[in-house]
Image: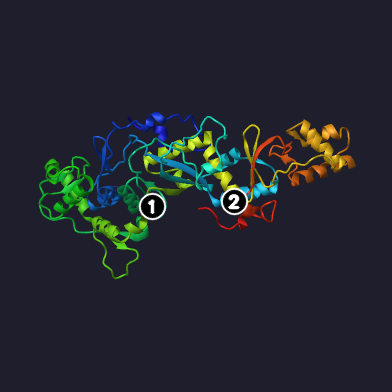
Amino acid sequence: MAERSDDRRRFRPSRPRGGERREERDGGRDGKSDRMTRRHGEERVEVPFEGAMAAATREDRSAEGGARGDRIRFSRSPEPLPDLAVSFLPERSGLHLVARRIASAACAFPLFQIAAFFLNQPDHLSVRLSPTPPASNSENENGSEEERTDSDQSENNPPVRQAQSPLPPPVLFQCQICKQVYQDRGRVSAHVFQQHFDRWYRKEEQEVEPPSGHFSSVARCPFSGELLGPPNHHAFEERLLYLHRTRFSHLSLEEYRRRLENVRDPALIEEWRKMASRKTRYFVVAASEEQSPLESIEKVERHFQEHYLADSIRGGTALTIPGPVAHALDDPALRRLVQEAWRRAMRFPLPLSITLRLMFRHMGLHIFKTEDGTHYVTAIMPSPLDPEGTAPAVREILEFLAAHPRATRSDLLGALRAGEEPDSPGVRELTAQLHWLREKGHVIEFTGGAFILPGSAIRRVQPAHPEERRENRRPKAAGERRRREG
Ligand SMILES: [Zn+2]
């Protein structure tokens, strides 16, 4: 099955499409085998590191007299999605930004709205890939937030579950430079070598004497079209071994050798001769001036493996990826996994909203749930006030809101101060008392401007964590907070 063309596009979380693509998860097994990996039945066999490396070296090959624009391609058919949980974690910077806004607005914000904000802003988000948890705490995707409490959650995020598997969790590999993640070591190594080559090496092209002597034929790789040179040329054997090792090791060396085409076309012989007259030398950036260059890409590769590879990648069963990178992963299966999870989260951001609850409470903000099951975050602790014995204007407001939940300021003024000028003493007093009630948490204002009383309209309040509440009703500037989770 060919990969759908729209899967190649960058995912745009702000415009989630229908997204019912689960059929693809199991699709593609019959597709063409990836050249980097091959399958024996369902078993995946990894080609050694060098095999993947070839992708990195294709430009160099042509410079050295080898390839003719051939490319190692990753599979175009979708691999099965890896058995990994995907969770979305707000970045601290974005979280502080939002917390400050909540504190300054003195309004109650719906958590889903804030979760959606983060999902639309990859810059303020991290994506964590981790083993799927063994228990089947599957998401209540259709329901409300009813049954979920903070105690259900680890300090991290409730992961979006994928299918369960008795197999050990897949190991992932991450480039430590740009944070791209791959499912196998060969790919991440090739990525690092290819994408970050210039950090370590500098290339220099050089014209050399073309090979002399009479050559009646050149050997050509039947798979890549690469010219290996005349079999009696001294560089032939090295090239053959290199190509076999890096790209065609699924064949035996003898088999590969046997498959080579011996071409007697003078034009091709001349083409090879031209290629062989250009030489690329490689200098190690960190080495001293006197150090002699590396004469071939094979030597650079070995040098890279010995000196730089280990520090450039990290392996693990759980890895965190910055949002912008996770948004455009190179690894096709991981990309689809994250995109699907992203779409699901956009449709129903409960897991992220639960994470936000925890984080906001650690930032001195309070969470409450209204009768319809919606969770809100606010900087002001809801605090019901008995109208008995309060000032007349206060009592008027409380009684009106008790009778008209979700009334707005203009509803209130229209009903209680009908016909009065905006700056009349009556209106001014009512406005001032409303402001005071709101500041004290005796009335709650929502972001849309509606007011409720914090009594019966609220089903549950989860106050900020105690140590965050000590001195303040409103959190201090969120940025001043000391580091916590993570
Ligand atoms: Zn990288």
* Residue 57 position within the rendered picture, expressed as x and y whole percent measured from the top left: 28, 51
Residue closer to the observer: 395 or 414: 395
User: Label 1, on which residue?
Assistant: 175
Q: Is residue 299 above or below residue 191?
A: below
Amino acid under label 2? Answer: His
Tell us which disc is closer to us: 1 or 2: 2
Q: Is residue 111 left or right of residue 436?
A: left
Residue 362 tag number: 2
Nearer the observer, 67 or 310: 310
Is 287 located above or below residue 50 in the figure? below
The image position of residue 282, as x and y in percent, is 29, 60
Question: Does mark 1's beta carbon lie closer than 8 Å to ligand 1?
Answer: yes
* Left or right: residue 266 compared with residue 98: left
Instruction: Give the x, y percent position of residue 164.
Output: 38, 36
Q: CA distance from mark 1 to mark 2?
A: 32 Å
Pick whichever, 243 or 381, lies toward us.
381
All told, the count of numbered labels is 2
Disc 2 residue crowd, few under 14, some 14–19, many 20+, Cα 10 Å? many
Image position of 394 (left or right of 71): right
Helix or strand or loop: what does disc 2 sit on?
helix
Which residue is at a point 62% across and 58% down the rendered structure image?
480
Look at label 1 and name its amino acid.
Cys
Query: Can I make out residue 227 in this image?
Result: yes
